[in-house]
Image (spheres, grey):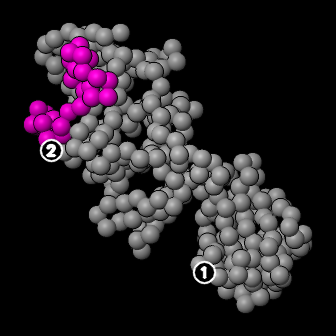
Amino acid sequence: MTKIINTNTEEQVILLIQHIFGRHPSTSHTVLINPDASRMHATILWNGEDWLLQDSSSNGTYVNGKPVLHGTKQRLRKGDLIHFASLLGDTWKMLDVSPPKSLLVPVTPGLKTIELAHLAVLPNEESPEITLYVSPNGHWVCESQSGISVLKTGDLVGCNGQTWRFIEAKASEETQFIESKELPNSPQVGIFFDVSQNEEHVSFKLKMDEQEYDLGQRNHHYLLLLLARKRIDDMQTGISVTEQGWVDKADLSKMLGQNENHINIQVYRLRKQLVDILPKSFSLPQAIERRTREIRFAFDDIKITGGTQMTELI
């Protein structure tokens, strides 16, 4: 997170992709108390490579004691000192100039800002009711009991009386373009299960871009095995692709002897495994799909070896 600090008050501010400083609270992300400041005094914005400052005020903005030319954009560097309206007013210091990251900014008082990397859950890992992750085309999506939706800047996200506002680390024009697009399908992924005869041990591998990734044996792989078998059975009986593999979560809970929260934890652990094992340049493949009260295995290129039955589909 890129931060700027008021050296007088020690207030630290996380810079948004396009961050407005000004005197008017309804139009400014950070309110300036200097009476000489304009309602919308200046903007610090990210252009994809650098942080830039653009002055739009009546009384000027200064970087390291020198005025910024009105209407121009000045590149900012780590350690730069910024004054709004007057050199005698508060001093703001650029703490770093790293690229912006998508954020969850608290709406409910007392919550912390959450920096989004690859995967996040709300309210916590022990009770993951909402999962946020990057889709194959690099955009953040929100998955909850009601399904999956593409997030755009300004969307509210939360549960249990805790609410955050999503801020995307992309230019507003791109965000508006994304909004009209449907959630993309996962890339083509080959799935390989190796199951012990008593089905107590399930190994899981996936193949992407001709590279194989071994996820080893985990307890949550049995959940994947059940969902994969349902997907294969539906394919073999001729059920349409859009309806293949869906399982009611209540039925799944009975099959596993686990409550829905425990199933959500297992799905989260799978996603965390994928984040840890895949190259950082990869977007997280959507292994589990959801719709109201139902989930299914996302992939249809599956091979299952061992177990009480042997099923193969390539």
Q: Measuring 12% from the left and 36% from the top, which residue is drawn there?
A: 251
Q: Measuring 54% from the left and 36% from the top, which residue is drawn there?
A: 137
Q: Quadrant of the N terminus?
A: bottom right
| Tag 2 secondary structure | loop
- Tell whether position 91 is magenta: no
Q: Is residue 279 above or below residue 50?
A: above
Disc number for residue 56: none
User: Neighbour class for label 2 at 10 Å: few (<14), some, many (≥20)?
Assistant: few
Q: Is residue 225 left or right of residue 79?
A: left
| Tag 1 secondary structure | loop
Residue 204: x percent and y percent? 32, 21
* Amino acid identity at mark 1: Pro
For the magenta stretch, what is the residue range?
229-258
* Amino acid identity at mark 2: Asn
Which of the 4 image quarters holds residue 309?
A: top left
Q: Earlier in the sequence, mark 1 or mark 2?
A: 1
Residue at mark 1: 25
Disc number for residue 259: 2
Mark toward the viewer: 1 or 2: 1
Which of the 4 image quarters holds residue 82?
A: bottom right
